[in-house]
Amino acid sequence: MERALKFIASILPLIFAFAFMVPVIDAGMQAVGVNAPFGLSTLSAALIIGGAWGVFAQITGRWV
Amino acid sequence: MNAQSVILPDDLSQLSDAELRRLELKIARKHSGMFPWGAVAWAFGNLAVWLSLWPLVFTGLLPLWAAFPIATINLALVYLPTHEAQHDIIARPGTKLRWLNELVGHATSWMMITPFEVFRVTHLDHHRHTNDPEKDVDITSMAPGPWSAIWAAIKARQPNAKRSADYVAALARNGREDLILLSLIYKLGFIGILGTLAWNGYALEALFLWWLPYQIAITYIIFFLSWAPHHPGNESGRYRNTRSWRSAVGNIGSMGMQFHIVHHLHPYIPLYRTPAAYREMRPILEARGCRLGDI
């Protein structure tokens, strides 16, 4: 149990990115009418942007 | 409550340490012990307003752009009633209204994604170790100027921030490792709620009613409750580790923290009484060599 919780705590940036940032970016793009490049859907773009940001935060320990 | 006025001698420099202490305590007692009904109303009123924003926005009765600043004010205001409860100001242990003190603490702290007991244990630890570079949980808020203080407050919330480690260390130092798990549950719960809303079509509502207001509010709170009243944060000792200061945004805009020195000296005085206590206590604080601003 303790190991599982420590693992969850260690990947919180990734959890946050995919649980919240991705749908927020998707909704934000739709709200302001921004189209994703290369014919991607806004959700695909959000997955790339949010996912990459989450990986960055996971590796570096900081969002900004 | 002791309403008697405390008459101070003209020349306090002739008084001994014990005599100064006696007068200081007399003033402190005069301004403490009353029921801070305002803090209780503030706690539940603020909570009710913030909770009401959600259905109002979901049903389209209130636009999100209008709800966002209200939510930000709600999140900024939520800490002070919790802070009163942390110091048992609403009701001390063993008293009739103790349940209300605890209810205020628990009912408000979750909005800031922190268990009430974590706030209490770590904040009281801050009082014990103010400005100690190793033990003060708020030491990471110290910065040379206001802009760097804002940046420090943002940095303090990053995943690898020292502030998180300082909080864990404070809980361990106080024998409350159990609260580390509870803190994690709160964080996961927060992400769970935000994620559930976001993946069900309410992403912007979750962003502008809770996540972003919280980020703005916590920066504001750290700035005015932690950085400003302790700046430059390099002195320890009862009469030197905090200060009085004149805020550019006034006492309300700085959440009553212009008189933070009174709070550190006598943390049982309700927030709304600290200005009056300060004015009465000021000659004593001067005699003690406290860091007093032009206020």
Image (cartoon, rainbow, N blue to C red):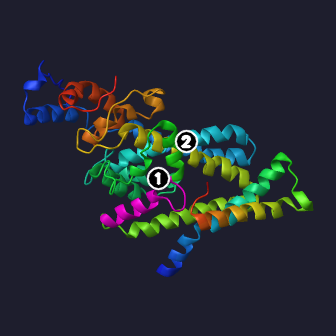
Disc 1: which chain?
B
Residue B175: x %, y % from top left: 31, 67
Q: Name the amino acid, label 1.
A: Ser
| Element on which disc 1 rests | helix
Q: Nearer the viewer, residue B50 or B174?
A: B174
Q: Is residue B270 above or below residue B171?
A: above
Residue B159: x %, y % from top left: 54, 61
Q: Is residue B222 above or below residue B247?
A: below
Residue ID for mark 2: B74
The magenta stretch spans which residues?
Answer: B156-173
Marker disc for residue A50: none
Q: Are marks 1 and 2 on the same chain?
A: yes
Q: Nearer the viewer, residue B126 or B78?
A: B126
| Element on which disc 2 rests | helix
Magenta span: helix, strand or loop, mainly?
A: helix
Marker disc for residue B109: 1
> What crowding class fits label 2: few (fewer than 14 Cα within 10 Å), some (14-19), or many (20 or more)?
many
